[in-house]
Each structure stands twice: as structure tokens, then as C-alpha cells.
Image (cartoon, helix red, strand yellow):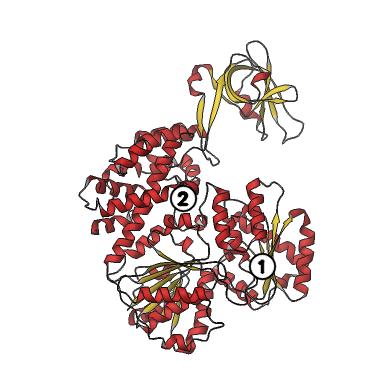
Amino acid sequence: MRPGILNPLFAEVEALKGVGAALAKPLAKLGIARVVDLLFHLPTGMVERRRIERLDMADAGRGVIVTLTAVSYKGSSSPRGPFRVQATDFEGNYVSLVFFGGNSGWARKQFPLNERRIVAGRLDLYGQELQIVHPESVPLEEAGEIVEREPVYPLSAGITSKRLAQLVAQALERVPSLPEWIEPSLIAQKGWPTFSQALERAHGDPADTMSRERLAYDEVFANQLALMLVRGATRRRKGRALAGDGRLRAKLDLPYVPTGAQARAIAEIEGDIAQETPMLRLLQGDVGAGKTLVATMALLVAVEAGAQGALLAPTEILARQHFATLQRQLSPLGLTVAILTGREKGRARESTLMGLADGSIDILIGTHAIFQEAVAYKALGLVVVDEQHRFGVAQRLMLAAKGERPPHMLVMTATPIPRTLLLASHGEMDVSRLDEMPPGRQPIETRVIAVERMDEVVAGLGRHVSAGGQAYWVCPLVEETEAGDDAAAESRAAALRLAFGEDKVGLVHGRMKGPDKDAVMAAFQQNDLAVLVATTVIEVGVDVPNATLIVIEGAERFGLAQLHQLRGRVGRGSGKSTCLLLRGNALSETTRARLTLMRDTNDGFLIAEKDLELRGGGEILGTRQSGEQGARLADATQTALLIPTAHADARLLTDRDGGLEAPRGQAARILLYLFERDAAVGLLRAG
């Protein structure tokens, strides 16, 4: 149960004065559904304005607050052109108040002729004239409404920064006085304010780094504590020792001898699962380093020992691909492999559930459906989670709390995680790294090409297809909505079909139904299609060795980790592979550096480290695809800096201040609920 002291913060945002259904919509687009979401939605900057008596060229480029009188209106000959309100100060100096968007009615209503109003905005020079674009204004009697300093918040259509600031003020009034969960000597050393003071100051002044750091630390500390509790609770519970006899692995027909890195990882896993203490291991491998082979060997060890194995994939496409591969490899060994996704219904589903319960199914492949309450295993010994970044801390907490005898867990990621951030997301795990490529994997040649050369790229694609080659064409994130991405992919597919013929080009995107997606993927895998146009649904795991060319459109809009993942769709066969990064023109220095890095190296571990340096703040690799809320208060740089301290403090709390009756233990429980790591609270209690 959430502590009652936090209830005011977890109330729906509609509980605030003035928030109805109309305002709740734009707030929801910002991820704000509860009061706590509003508190954690921090401003990104500050608008500063000077009160002035008279208009002066010397103030151009500054924010100002000035009393003005509208004297005339001036429309535009074009319907989309600006509407101007000519206004003067008390000395008769002129300024143009400029409105775009074709709605002159609103501007006239805001500025009735010959009426004095308080106006705020940025004063600019347009030629030799002063102007203010889209100013704010209030009548004289409401002069106090316009302030000299105002925080700037990330916004969505339908809400202003001012309105958001008013709601935040209401939310701040609801923050209770909470007990301190940080070690007292650390607070003294850092000079940090209390949690509630830090919230208030961070909203009042975005440049207050001390308060920002305190809040970032709270979030990182909550995560570290949760991960430590998972590890402790898992270590305390007895699992099942799984010692394989090698009989199934000896029969497996391998395409190549495992690399040294694969052999090392398999040995580490085998050693872990032979113990009663449940394994928690992260397998980090670059794109194409052969993680699937390691996972297959681990699953075979479990089955040799008389247990069942489960493989959890992040998407249905990937689950079906794993199923096809494992069924082909393992059926000759006499094993039964089954699949369970949201699509399996009726008799097929019932039959699978019965097979799991009576033990006749050895290995289950599926999406999150494999952990629903209705799914009962006779003897689940090992769970392999593919693409770790989509299976976050919250889901791992849920899994750790399941069952009397927890299964061993192996999680895999092809998104290499910078060493500095490994503790942040995987503090409870042992780590194996695959840093060698299997024989036959070709380095991929990467080129960066300006979008103006699109015709050349399409012509090159035509030559590639004529020679019997296959290619991917990935469309960028166009809007915040899936529909926007899908529309971009649809129009690109239509253009390529005109160039190469209807039957040569396939399309997959997020809105398609599962069976339709599968049919297109199968056609591409069987070489019935030459070009597959896709959104990022093909990002992970899709395996078509004959595809040796990938074109990534709008490459500057992707993160480095995602570009590296997408590039890994090619280079899977013996042919030479190429990745073309099509870029727009408006590139920042950081974007240029990212694309250059992609061109210069195929090493995912190096890319991950550099990506963290280049991004500084922002999204930790892969969190955009994560199935859980990412960090809201700590950016990647802060996380990397604060983790060692947070990790040490969490250990101090669990080891030295371990008694839950101690005041700091009680405060830490509130912290876990506050940051929604409360699945760990049960484990805290068990401690």
C-alpha cells in the first residue's frame, strides 16, 4: 500500500483547480496525468523581461514589458501572411505587434483601438522598425499578471507556459513534509536542500543546479536501492540448481565453432545456473555477435537438467523469428518448442497452456503474454529476455517477485551500454560481454549522403535490385505519433513501387495487423520482395542474410544506438554490405559528429561511449523504446556522475541501516513509492 502521506501527489491532475477534461488532454500529451507528473515536469529555461517606460532601439533583442496603445490594423495581401497591429508608447514611438496564422479576429480582440494595455514579449528590429511577434497582453488593471521572470516549460498544443506554471504552483502546495532518505553526512557535504525545497527552487529557477542535482540524485538513488533489493531478495531465495549433462548440446548442429567470447559467456552461465542461487546475468553483445547461440545453449542446459526454458522477445515479429529458428534447430533433438503471443487464441492457446502445465513443452517463445497470471509452468528453470532495453527495471522487479522458486534469468541486449551507465540500469546483474564477431561476419561500409542526392540513391538501389540483391529502406520519425511514421513509410513505398514495380516493394509499419506484417516479412525473407520499406519496427533481430543494403532516411533524427541497431540488419551473410545514411541539411555540430562516428566505426561499444559524450544530457541509450517511464529528473550525464555515490548510499542503507524500523529505512520506503519502484517495497519488507 502506498503511504497515505503521498496520496495528495498521486491524485489525478483533475483534482487541481481549473483542470477539466479540456485541459487534461494537452496535459496527457505531456505525460501529465497526476499531480506528481506535474511536479516532475521541470522547466527548461527562463523568460526574463525588463519593464520599460518608452520604446528604444537599444532594447532590441530583449524581453520587455511596456504600456502600449493600438492605433491601427494592417492586414496582408496573402491569406497566410502576418496581421499587424500598429501601437505606440506614451511618447508616440511606434512598434508593430505581429501575428501569424491568419486569425486577425483574435489580435483585434486583444488590442482594441485606442485602448492602453500592458504588453510583454521580445522586442526585435525588422529593418528599421521595432516589432514584437505574438506578444502577451493584459488590461492595465491586471498588470500584476505579467511578471518579469517566468519559467519556460516543455508544452503541447492547447496549453501555455504561464498556465502550466499556475498548475505547478498548486501542485507545489500539495507537497508534504517528507522524512529525509539521504545519508545525513552526504547532504551536509553536498549542501543540498530538502526534497520539497529542491522541487520549489527547480521550478522557480531552472538555473538552480544544486536543486536539480538533489532531485536527480533522489531518482538515481531510488533506482539503485530497488535494484539492490531485487538482487538481495533473489540471492536469498532458493532457485533450482540446473546441471546439464551435455547430451542435447552434443547433438546440436552448429553453423560454426563458438567464438572465444561466446564460449566464455556459455561457461559463465553454466556455472551460474548450477547453483541454487538464481542467476541474474546480462549478456551484452554487439549487433551480430551471436547472442542467440549463447541463449540457445543456456536453454539446452536447462532442458538437459529436466527444467523448462522461456524466451521473451520484445516484439511479435522477433518472437516469431526466434520460434522459427529454434524449432528448426531443436526439433531434430526431440524437443518441443511452442510460441505464445497476444495473437494465439482459442484451442491453440489452450493446448500451449496445457503443455506448459504438464511439462510436455520444453521451451516457450513469446512476448510479454508468457508472464500472464494464467500461464503456469510445470518446472520453469530459465528465462531469457531478449532486447533488455525494452524490459525495464519495473518489469524485472515484477518477475523477481513471482513464484516460490524464482527461475534463473539471462537478459540480452544488442544496444551496448556505456560502462558508466551499466550500474544505472543493471546494478543487480553480473555482466558477460561478447566482444568478438563470429567468422564470416562482414564489416559494413557506411556512407553519409545529402538528401538532395535522393535520385542517385534510388538509381543505385535499382542497380542493386537488378543484380538480385535485397534492401531495407527505413523511414524516420516524422511526428510524435505512430501514424506520422506510418504515413512517411507509405508514401516512400508508393514512390519506390512506381520506380521498381508493385510486386517488388513490401511495407511494414506499426499500425499493420500482426498476420499482415508476418506475411510481408516472410515474403522478404523468401526473396519474393526485393525492397522492404519500414518504420523502426525492424530495428531488432530481423535476419535476412541476402539483404546487403540498407537506406536510412532522415538519419539525423535517429539516436546513435538506434542507427547502429538498424545498420545491423545487413552484414548477416557472406556478401559485402552497405548502409546509406540519408541526411537533411540543418545539422547541428552534435548531429554531424554522430553521423561521422557511424561512418567511421562498426564497434557498438565505442559508439555507446561516444554517444553518451555527445548527448551529454538527454536520453540514455534505448530508453525511448523502453517499456517503462524513463528517467524524468536525471539526464544521462547526471546519472553517470551520481551513480557511484547512490550505489554506495544504497548499500549503506541495506547493510548498515538495514533495520526497517530505523527512520531512514522508513523514509526510503516512501522514496520507492514516490518514484514508482514500489515493487521493491515487498522485497524491502522481506529483508
Question: Closer to the N terminus: mark 1 or mark 2?
Answer: 1
In the displayed structure, would residue 397 be above or below residue 55? Answer: below
* Secondary structure beneath label 1: strand
Q: Position of residue 611 (x, y in %)?
A: 57, 54
Going by the picture, which residue comes out furthest to the top?
Answer: 91
- Label annotation for residue 148: none
Where on the picture, by quarter, is residue 560? bottom right
Would you say residue 489 is visible in this rendering? yes
Image quadrant containing the C terminus: bottom left
Residue at horizontal 52%, vertical 23%?
148
Find residue 682 and report its horizontal and vertical position in percent.
27, 57
Rate crowding at label 1 as few (under 14), some (14 to 19) or many (20 or more) other CA atoms within 10 Å. many
Judging depth in this view, the residue of 298 and 265 nearest the camera is 265
Q: Measuring from the top left, give residue 643's x and y in whole percent.
A: 41, 50
Q: Amino acid at mark 2?
A: Ala
Q: CA distance from mark 1 to mark 2?
A: 31 Å
Q: Which residue is mark 2?
A: 640
Disc 1 residue type? Ile
